[in-house]
Image (cartoon, coloured by chain):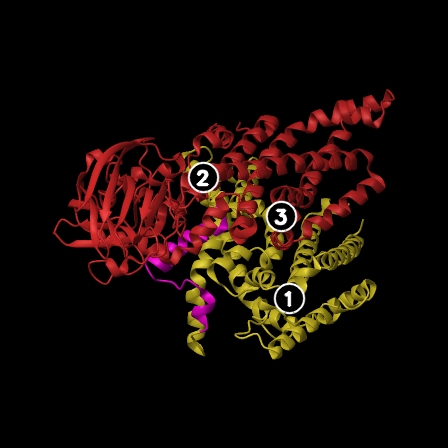
Chain colours: A yellow, B red
Amino acid sequence: MSLVGYILRRLALTAVIMVVVAAINFLLFQVMPFTLLGINPEVWYVPAISTSHNLQYITEIRERVISELGFNLPIQYRFLRYMESLFTFHFGYNVGGVLSGPVSATIARFAPYTILLLGGSTVASFIIGEYLGVFSASRRGRPADKVSFVTLLFLYSMPSFWIGMLLLLAFAYYLKLAPSSAAAYMSQFTGASYYAAVLRAMALPFLSLTLISIGGFYLIMRSSALEVMGEDYILMARAKGLRERDVLYRHVLRNAVLPVMTVFAISLGFVLSGAVITETIFGWPGLGYWTYMAIITQDFPLEQAIFFVISLMVVLANLIADLLYGLLDPRIRR
Amino acid sequence: MAGVVIIAFFGLMALLAPHIAGPSPTQPYVAGPWAVPAWATVFPQYRGLPPNLSAVPPSMSAWRSAAGPGASVELVQAQPPGDLVSRTRQGVPSADAALISALVPPGSRDVVYTANYTFNYEYEPPYEFAFGALVKPISVENLSDFYLRFLLVRPDGTVVRLTSYEVMSSSFQEDISYDNGFRLGNWNIAYLSTTLPDVNLAAFGPSGLGMTNTGLDILSERGNYTLVVQVVALGGSSPGSLKVELAYPFLFVYGRQYGLLGSDNMGRDLWSQFVWGSRISIEVGLLASIFTVVVGMYLGVIAGVFGGAVDEFLMRVADVFLVIPFLPLAIVVVYMLTHSAFLSSELYLWLILLFVVLSWPAVARVIRSQTLSLKERGYVEAARGLGAGRLHIIRRHILPNVMGLVYANLALNVPGFILTEAALDFLFPGASTVPTWGRMLSKAFDHAASAAYYGFGWWWFIFPGIAIVLLSLSFVLLGYALDEIFNPRLRQR
């Protein structure tokens, strides 16, 4: 099959997958027990004194929520309305009581935080994982390899919330070097000092995420590098009398990085969703944090929209990974 | 190898949980709040912390006692109901009681009985303690009230009035049942604890004491303390009498060192929570992995062997499941489950189902590609040439050859499930009351701010996390080991 055919086929499949995922997303929030969607007015507004005015207010909000979610319409209209919203990016309005305004604006406002945090830590852990992987492979079976293998496996098996807790306990509560809640800390600043505050608040979640995700890259890189090191051209490079460092970082690393690249592309797709727990723990106001907050505050339009955006990113990343692979490795284009 | 040992260790722990857990994981104040593990007292900063401690003996014969004016005392054997005795934590089923008979003149306010016991307290001050006694009012006539008074004489001679415990109100009734539920002719417990929110010991303390950690102020120094228990009778309008039995006086110091893993902010046993928590982790991890691998194996083999439309359909379905974001979906589902009484009772079974539904595609893909390569092998073609059916080929030639991959995947899938389950418990600690490692950590994290005051509660934060890591890690190691056994090419040349 030609490259163009391969790309077209991939595109078509991606479109189909996206439609199915969107339908699942729609159905998920339809089977949500209806009692969740408006019985609990305290979530939106807690009246100090229960007057008839307050009750009226609550009822109004509740009705707005129901019409916002389209529960006054038959399901087929709701579905069409939902599918339409995926193209217009009009996902409705926040109803959780914490945020106000259109959901799309909320996402646009908070996505940069996630992209900054996750993008940065994914790239950082990718690079560190690469080099550690090759280093470890070059010392296979020796103490340096064993130590780094077990250490990274340990980091890999760490629950993200645990490492976050320990970092917070050590740096925020004990040493008092970092804020315990990023969002609360950052909101105290404006202007240029805001960006300094963002960096300061980002340090712990960044460290936490990087530590967790190095392991995955390292493990793949190590096995990939081990495979490459058995190839004839590496033997050739050694026979030419190249320095070991050049062999490792020019020949082994470059060839071994290929399978890791696709994993990298896919994990970039999970950038938006991967950090729900870390963001929640550190109070980092990104999409992961709002994934959790939206469900806690029953902000279903927001939850549904975040869901869609995350799935979209994953699908696109998969597509890019596939295309990249097809471009780089002709054997794949079957 | 280390992996297998760790898995066996936690497996045994999960199996034997009812026998090794000790007290119920949800019972508060089995020890003081934020008690360090008992073994931690080898470290200098925890030396001298009090263990759970009964400071005074239950038997009145060990006490110095004196009858007041118009009263007489004799020692009798008492055998109060076991549940009351266990609340005093004195640990003996029967003890000597003091039988007090007193004539009470009208309008008097006399101490009809005093017992005191001097004990040596040689520990750091406790956060909390409890005290009280068992009382059996036998006859109460023409009294306006009688009460128990608890005093504590500190080493420096100051007297702390711990409390005056009213046994009856001013109204006379044959059957004295009040808000504290005392009943005539029965054993009753006068129980007070600094942990009870409505006991305001502040008024009685030596210096304007706060409500929290009263023990720090009252048992603040080492030395000889004397606990004094008095029975005070208030005469009515005509001559009255009082006959009452008093037994099992207690002063229970809630330990600041306790058990294998210490206690949480409410004095609950963390070792017990830890042991029971191993059950859920192993159960969810293993069951989800087994079902995932079985479903993935069959669908993968079917896709590989049948090919064509079947293959295409299964793989496209797999594609869809692979792009659904796992954790966000799990969060939504757990949220839905917790809001339904019917579904939340089997929360972990639903979680397993969710894990299987979302994770089989990855296994199916691996098995499918292995099947595709097996299908082209000579012996499979030979079998096909001899007229073997697809089912026969699957059973005899494909399945045995993918088993290595299956076993490796079985082990390699477990850690992800254990971690995700723990993460969900962490995010939704209220979803269930079952103790789990994730829930322990969640509660610990809720108290991270106050932990600073209590030595940072490292015993609460560290051990559940270590357990999760070790268990996951050992399954990863096991998976790698299996992979190497079944995949000789991976072995070191």
Is residue B424 rendered to the left or right of residue A200? Answer: right
Q: Which mark is residue B24?
A: 2
Whether discs 2 and 3 lie on one chain: the answer is yes
Q: Which residue is mark 1?
A: A302
Q: Does the segment drawn in magenta span residue B167?
A: no
Q: Which mark is residue B344?
A: 3
Q: Are marks 2 and 3 in contact (CB under 8 Å)?
A: no
Q: Secondary structure at mark 3?
A: helix
What kind of residue is marked 2? Ser
What kind of residue is marked 1? Leu
The residue sitting at 39% across, 49% down in the picture is B176
Is residue B423 rendered to the left or right of residue B290? Answer: left
Within 10 Å of the Cα at label 2, are there few (<14), some (14-19), or many (20+) other Cα atoms?
some
Look at the image and give the residue range highlighted in magenta. A158-187
Is residue B367 rendered to the left or right of residue A195? Answer: right
Q: Secondary structure at mark 1?
A: helix
